[in-house]
Image (cartoon, coloured by chain):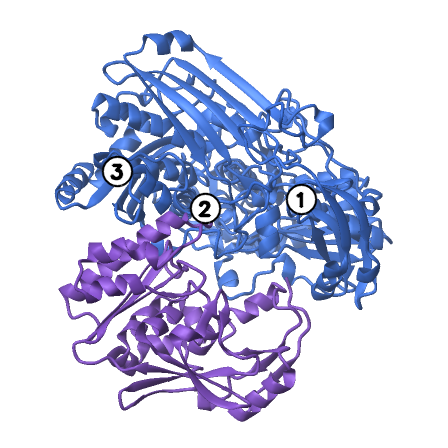
Amino acid sequence: MKAAAAGYVRANDLSHAISLLAASEGQARVLAGGQSLIASLNLRLAGETALIDINGVTELCGIALDGDVLRIGALTRHRELATSDLVARHAPAISQAAPLIAHAAIRNRGTIGGSLAYADPAAELPACMIALDATIVVQGPAGRRGVRATDFFIDLFTTDLGEDEMIVAIEVPACAPGERQVTMELARRSGDYALAGIVLVRRENGARVAFFGVGPTAVLARAAMAVIDREGSPDEAAAVLDQDIQPLDDVHAPASVRLHLARVLLRRALNATLAAEVGHV
Amino acid sequence: MTINFGNPDRPNSYIGRTVPRPNARRLVEGRGRYVDDIVLPRMLHVAFVRSPHGHARILAIDTGAASAVPGVRRVFTGADIAEFCSPWVAVLAHLKGLKSAPQHPLAMERATWTGEAVVAVVADTRAAAEDGAALVEVEYETLPVVTDIRTALDETTPLIHSELGDNLAFRRLHEHGEVDAVFAGAHTVVEASFKTARHTGVCVEPRSILADYNPAEGQMTVYHSTQAPHMMQSVIAQHLDMPEGRVRVICGDVGGSYGIKVHVYPDEMATVAISRAMGRPVKFIADRIESFATDIHARDHEIDARIAVDGDGRILGIDVDDWTGIGPYSVYPRTSAIEGNQVVNLCGGPYDFAAYRARTTVVLQNKAPTCQYRAVGHPIAVAITEGLVDFAAEALGLDPVEMRRRNLIRDDAYPCTSPANMRFEGLSHHASLTKLLELMDYDGLRAEQAALREKGIHRGIGIASFIELTNPSPFMYGIGGARISAQDGCTVRMDPDGSVVAMSGVTEQGQGTEAMLSQIVAEAVGVPVTRVKVVTGDTQTTPYGGGTWASRGAGIGGEAALQAGLALKDSILTVAGSMLQCAPDGLDIVDGQVCDKAGGEARMPLEELGRIVYFRGDTLPKDLPRELVQTRHFITSDYPFAFTNGVQASYLEVDTETGFVKLLKHWCVEDCGRVINPQLVDEQIRGGIVQGLGGALFEECHYDEDGQLLNANMADYLVPMAAEMPDMVIGHVETPTQESLLGAKGAGEAGTAGAPAAVMNAVNDALRPLGGRVTQMPFTPARILASIGVE
């Protein structure tokens, strides 16, 4: 199929992008890496959508450590996440997740801001944000605000982002000494959406476990976290996962298999954090 | 004329050598020419409105809004197209009882599968045509949908075509020997049920056609991504009511076909009809969704089968009940009964046994039509046969290799005829198995497997012997009334500079046909391979032929090229003898030079001979024949098909916690007779194995009970990809066919034929200690976990 005719504007800077977005009154979409948006345009799923191209907005680029917060610009490509020394040291869960995102050509173009705004429940990065308790920094005509990741992802492809707002950065608590992080997934083929995936973060003040590919959003596994925090075994934590995730049947696997695979991943991730200094490079 | 193929140092010894493909650089540099690269003056594009329902009556079509879209030139309904193109019914006389309903390019009263083309919108650009298509309003009344194979013939199941009386397209029962008595008296009988998933070919280049009707000369020129240009010429001429001589089909570069592009597609016939109606060039390129929904599917089979063996593991009988669903129509002109028919023909093929019964039941359903796809029926028959053989070996406590040793047809038993009445000229099952075991170090792998099982690692080894049908005679289609040539021809010409042009009726699909032809012609004439230019894919310039299907290019087209090349060599030497005042049979041509056969001394370069013949013919004797163009045709006569054989092995690891399968290594030893280009043959085998592995582990068209295709995209339909593929080791045994001088049989489908069975047997070998067994492809994590009671 061929995309329907649509408008296109290239934003010069962040304030220009925000003013264009506001002026479009919800009719425009922000074009970053375009790895999901262009495909949906070509499938004519997005309608006759005007595009605001932010690829020239340098304020959205860059990765920096600010005290104990790792700040990642929204326009950061997946390949940069995978190769950044700062990300490897201060957010190893993201560093482990990035190579699992699709294929090299997609990682070269796709951005962290785009992935989070799209909110695909099978994507790796939303689960990373939830597990890391990251803050999504968004900006609109009314100014800038930070949203906790757990409040940002509302439903399937639905976020807290206002129609006149865009993601400008992500703020991740830097990995503390002794903290362990592990990202794992089970995908049929390299680069596929996983049948189930996990991001496990073990901090001094408690464990955080997020799953992806097992429901309408990436999900924080609170019941399993409680078992881990009271030092239950991996089997005990896996046993309560049905309270945390309720997958659906689809062409790739029945719901029961996804739940089973999530349990396998939780046991494997917990054993990995017990066995070695995972997450410290 | 003989060629000493056994001597690699013979002159011009291109046959048997890896020679670079002449078209590889062009394709790698992006300088190929596919149909979509062709732009003609006044060209239009067509987009189709397709049925969103599995089965629906078309009540009304409103094309008003679509016609008003800027750039839209015309909108055609089924009735509009029917004025320019007659319907077809895909039956063949030798498939007794096969029935189907008349099919039009666009649906008429009813749409019968999701994706069937209903309305065609023609515009200046594809985007404008899609803008128009989005505004066409079709009012449907949904009708009951038939999706399940086993209940398709029940009295309570609605009929897809009421005029046919039932949903049965074809049924064939073949019986040989006293089957019931053999099973009743056997030491051991093992039963199993198998399913092979409906899947499709997924060509890199989608189906593509550009039809250009020129009213001023009454000529239809069709640029088509196809395997069979002459077949398409005949079909287009017949259904557009034109003389065949006024239809020219040109097939340039093709980005893969695998059987997908050897059929008549309604939307392509509509495109040709539109060009006829409008007198302008019209292009249709299927997009990926259209490809999934309307390319032919295949392999949708459910089978109950059993095997009877004696106490020593000798196979006494095989009994197969095969059911397959083919969609709402038999596909034109090859029909959709062939795949089930092949299952009947091929089950038990490698083995020496007495009693055989096989029945195939081919039913209609409201899903995409199925038809011949790479290795037609073979992966199904091999999975049934090799699955049963392994299960019988397990029941008797025999090693799978020993089980095969006791039952494979002896290598000195040929010629012979199988219980399915297939005639074998010469096969090498035992020699191939011996070579396979050496290549894979079978005993070493078994030891490794046992050691790892102690550590809780579950690896499996699977073996699959197979036969492959190649080099078909008219017994495949021609005797049934189809205008599909089993003969093929080649014209070879020497030009003044001593270079050679070869025009062949077989076609290049990206698999290397032109490389194979160029080295055969180079050897036959005696010129460097770089001096041979091969032309294929044009009904107006090449000899009449069948094209690419059933692994016939090398065996049929190659022999025609060899004979034409040898004939040209004779013609050249006749002239050379006159010019050099010596007997032609004392001369030879080596590396582009006429030379003395005895001493090898160079006498004259071919360009000198060319200069004299073409520009100074006055210096030659008046009555000297100087025909530097020769054509030869070849058709097989002694056997209906040239069967090949081979054996594959898979080594893999099953993660028994997740149900994931990791392919570790794969081996194939096969016997395609004379190997012309070892690298091309090996890569054909590897590519075929990859497609077989796709069927075993990944590929499945998921339809819901309403006939909706749920995974018509590359994210949800899992094709096998490089990262998951194992190393593949290929070996050969060569048993040339005696039917031709070349001795080549086909190699294009062997990999696909055996790979799924090898993987199935390996998975079950891995699961055996846990009591698991899988027989439903693809072997997904869910199916593997269910078989061992996990989750």
Indicate the secondary structure of the residue bearing disc 3: helix
**Are discs 1 and 2 less than 8 Å apart at CB?**
no
Residue B332 visible, this orientation? yes
Label 2: which secondary element: loop
- Left or right of B760 on screen, residue B161: right
Which chain comes out purple in the rendered image? A
Q: Could you tell whether B615 is left or right of B341 in the image?
A: right
Residue that mark 1 sits on: B265
Identify the residue position indicated by label 2 in the image.
B699
Q: Is B507 on the left-hand or right-hand side of A68?
A: right
* Front residue of B612 and B359: B359
User: Which kind of residue does numbered mark 2 sit on?
Assistant: Glu
* Discs 1 and 2 share one subunit: yes
- Display colour for chain B: blue
Task: Work out how far the residue at label 2 is from the one at label 3, CA to CA, in angstroms.
Answer: 22 Å
- Mark 3 = which residue? B767
Badge 3 vs badge 1, beta-carbon distance below 8 Å:
no
Indicate which label's residue lies in the foreground, 3 or 1: 3
Amino acid type at mark 3: Leu
What is the CA distance from the residue labelled 3 to the residue labelled 1?
43 Å
Near-viewer residue (B585 or B282): B282
The answer for which chain carries disc 1 is B
CA neighbours of label 2 inside 10 A, class few (<14), some (14 to 19), many (20+): many
Give the percent coordinates (x, y) of residue A85: 27, 81
Q: Nearer the viewer, residue A80 or B624?
A: A80
